[in-house]
Image (cartoon, rainbow, N blue to C red):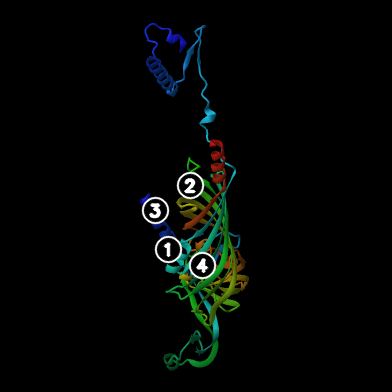
Amino acid sequence: MKKLLCILALTSLLACSSNNCPLGSTVQCNYYFYDRNGVAIKYGDSFSVTTLLPGEKTVYTYRKLGYQTETRNSRDTTLVNAGYTETVGTARKDTLLVNKASGRAYIQVPMSYFNKADTLIFDYSSISGNDTIIVEHDGYAHVELPECGTHVYHHLRSVRSTDAAIDHLEITNPLVDYEGNENIRIYFNDVVE
Amino acid sequence: MKEMKTSGFISTTWWSKTVVASLMMVFACAMSAQDEPIVVVNESDTIRPTKYIAELMEEPPLPFFQGFTLSGDLFGPALYLISDYGSVEAALRLNLKSTYFPIVEVGYGSCKTTDAETNISYSTNAPFFRIGLDWNILKNKRQDNRLFVGARYGFSSLKFDMSGPNMTDPIWGGSAPFNYKDASSNSSWLEFVFGTQVKIWRNFHMGWSVRYKHQIKVGQPDYAKPYYIPGYGTTTDTSCWGGTYNLIFDLNWGKKKLRQTTNKTDK
């Protein structure tokens, strides 16, 4: 009887003190790739995803007749010495979220905590154009357990894009949390394979 | 006795008569004390056992309503002294034939905690209720000690406060406080109970119970899940173990009535 009580007490301690925080506890929006007919695909070519940030930055643009225009975030004296004409301007700040991904069936992209909409720019290596996706969402703080910390969940309201390589978009699960479920489907057109 | 008196083998003195009478009585008593039925052989040589009157050996049936018990839990307050949460609770349990015990438990739970790593604070103070049934599995229902298995349905309507450090967006920037007050939650759960109750002195008993609890529903607003539900415990998992250590006042009317009836019958 004493042994049974000890086992029960130990079990109760273990049951009530275990940490149940999710392992991958990063809240990210999951974009899955499909062709225009709705068949799941792996995107073969490489692409990068950047997002626009609040505020502006100084941009240095270098042009030379017969050469490709170069853009830098800081002054490049070597280009000036090479005969390029420098133009100083401003542009929206941005940051790289996905760098040269290839052969991917889906990507995971973080969302802003406090902005009402996120702008994502898909830059493809195989085509000259790029696509801009605008995702409107409501973010709210969520605590599953005090030991797990604070997370920001999101409820997707709408999504739209340009059509360089994207046929259309679809929200499949509006709740963005750390469960890793598919949230948005990107249907690519036939421009990219 | 007259026939014996006429026997030539035994003398007819007063002493002889007394001895013979005593022997006959001892023999008769010995015969009647035997467990085996007496077999009487009549003239037609048929054997007929005497009737065993079972009714005389049977105890009178237990009254349906035996009384009730009032109990208080000592484990909940003790838990509050050594941890961040605890509760006080009392229970009223009806006694039906000393076998079935419908029970209502009412309590008040409290929790105030801050996680050392995340610095997130949680606090709540709220009542809780449980309703259920215990079943005394001991064979002898007339004794004062009991061994129970049972089940409960628990419910708590609570409001909780939760606050933490400011949230800062690592990519887009910006910061906002995390501070919520009076968040509402209606939660319910199921408990499976195993327990015992032992008589200490007169109507006072002591007992303990071990409970396996499983969440049915944990109502929660979008921003937080209640960390502690009064009557259930912490919500780190969808099920949990718990227990009580009870001081019990057992008012057993049925037993008192039975005793009175037995005394009257004896007189």
Q: Which residue is mark 4?
A: B227
Q: Chain of mark 3?
A: A
Label 2 belongs to which residue? B144
* Residue type at the position of mark 1: Ser
**Front-lying residue, B155 or B44:** B44
Q: Which residue has dot 3 on it?
A: A5
Asked whether disc 3 touches disc 1, contact meaning CB atoms under 8 Å apart, the reply is no
- Report the side of A57 relative to A136 (left or right): left
**Disc 4 secondary structure class:** loop
Residue A156 or B30: which is nearer the viewer? B30
**Chain where mark 4 sits:** B
Foreground tag (3 vs 2): 2
Q: Which residue is mark 1?
A: A17
Question: Residue at horizontal 52%, vertical 92%?
Answer: A87
Query: Between disc 4 and disc 2, whose residue precedes?
Result: 2
Q: Are marks 1 and 4 on the same chain?
A: no
From the top left corner, tell me how far across and down residue B142 is, in percent. Answer: 50, 42
Q: CA distance from mark 3 to mark 2?
A: 23 Å
Q: Is residue A191 visible?
A: no
User: Which residue type carries mark 3?
Assistant: Leu
User: Do the residues under discs 3 and 4 have CB atoms within 8 angstroms?
Assistant: no
**Viewer-side label of 3, 1:** 3
Image spot of residue A156 (x, y percent): 61, 70
Which residue is depicted at the point 43% across and 58% down? A12
Q: CA distance from mark 2 to mark 1?
A: 37 Å
Q: In this rendering, which labeled residue sits more in front, label 4 or label 2? A: 2
Q: Amino acid at mark 4?
A: Tyr
The x and y percentages for residue B172 are: 52, 80
Q: How many marks?
A: 4
- Label 2 is placed on what type of residue? Asp
Say few, some or many: other residues with alpha carbon within 10 Å of mark 1 (under 14 / 14 to 19 / 20 or more). few
**Distance from label 3 to label 4 (Cα)?**
27 Å
